[in-house]
Image (spheres, grey):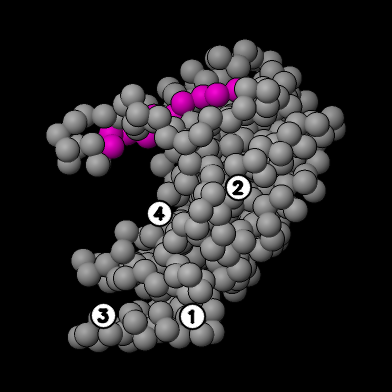
Amino acid sequence: MTGRLPPPLGSAHPATRSTRVSHPIPYQGSKRSLAAQILAFFPQPIDTLIESFAGSGAITLAAAARGLANHYHLNDLNGPLIDLWRMIVEEPHRLATQYETIWRAQHGNRREYYDEIRAEFNRTRRPHHFLYLLARCLKAAVRYNADGAFNQSPDHCRMGALPETMREQILGASFLLKGKTEFSAEDYRAVVLRATADDLVYLDPPYQGVCGQRDPRYLKGVLFDEFVETLEVLNARDISYIVSYDGRTGDKVHGRPLPRDLRLRHIELEAGRSSQETLLGRAAVTYESLYLSPALTERLRWSRRVPLKAIEQSAFLEAAA
């Protein structure tokens, strides 16, 4: 494997550096709060970080803020989302101005105005309309109807990020990614199967890793068997990848287990108390699962010269700091 020499024993991984990250896209299910823990398992060096289910791009932004890869690839089957990402990175000032124009045009009947923008977005798929909807929609949760039209209702308790705040977030994201990011709106399999041994693939597929039936949060689900077959191919090609897949709340396990013969290293990341369990009077903590590919596990041992168990402990200590 080509690249710079591994750091000496005891040297700090770049993921442990305290770095401010801009997040222009609010998105339910974002890994923003877990990014520091996830990045602790990144190898050194990385040519291209491929985020195959981009969403809010939280992992890509956090990695770019720490300079963990030479290039970045944001992919999502949701074409308008990728169009928005492309504009954030390549035309940040124009997008910020368009958002401000829409935001300041809100009037007394904000629900009627929101519905007008939503109808316009479903007709034209323009990025600035989508950004406004994401900033205003209920719980920052994307929802689509059977025809693929955005149909989420507005959050009546908030008006979306202030234009000044949104501009700062857009410009910050553009600064991190401009000139070194590729965008695509393809099936995740086509993207990850182009990865090389010098890259790192991060997969955060739809809820619990599988959606065998239609889920209104996504334009298309991910079939379990198809997903497992893709991971098998990546293993056969010695591709380094990380999967955010399932998890548990207390003793309740979410998701169908990934096959043992994939030989993945399973790690649990503490995600805090479950709000749903708290409402029910139970103090249950949620843990999200992370899976490291065999090639990545070996690459971490080589590049870091420390046992993987020590890397895990370092990640958890960093998250608790």
Residue topped by disc 3: 111
- In the rendered image, residue 229 lying in the magenta stretch gets the answer no
Q: Position of residue 10 (x, y in %)?
A: 59, 16
On residue 223, the disc is 2
Q: In the rendered structure, are the residues bearing label 1 and label 3 in contact, judged by CB atoms less than 8 Å apart?
A: no
Identify the residue at image location x=41%, y=42%. Answer: 33
Mark 2 lies on a secondary structure that is loop
Say if residue 303 shows up in the picture. no
Residue topped by disc 4: 28
Above or below, 154 against 270 in this view is below
Identify the residue at image location x=42%, y=35%. Answer: 254
Q: What secondary structure is the magenta-colored segment mainly? A: strand
Residue topped by disc 1: 122
Instruction: Specify whether 226 is left or right of 117.
Output: right
Q: Which residues are magenta?
A: 265-274
Q: Nearer the viewer, residue 62 or 215?
A: 215
Q: Quick one: label 1, few (<14), some, or many (20+) residues within 10 Å?
A: some
Mark 3 lies on a secondary structure that is helix
Q: CA distance from mark 1 to mark 2?
A: 27 Å
Front of the two marks 1 and 2: 2
Above or below, 130 against 262 in this view is below
Front of the two marks 4 and 1: 1
Q: Quadrant of residue 279?
A: top left
Q: Nearer the viewer, residue 251 or 35?
A: 251
Q: Which badge, 1 or 3, comes first in the chain's sequence?
A: 3
The amino acid pointed to by label 3 is Arg
Q: Quick one: label 2, few (<14), some, or many (20+) residues within 10 Å?
A: some
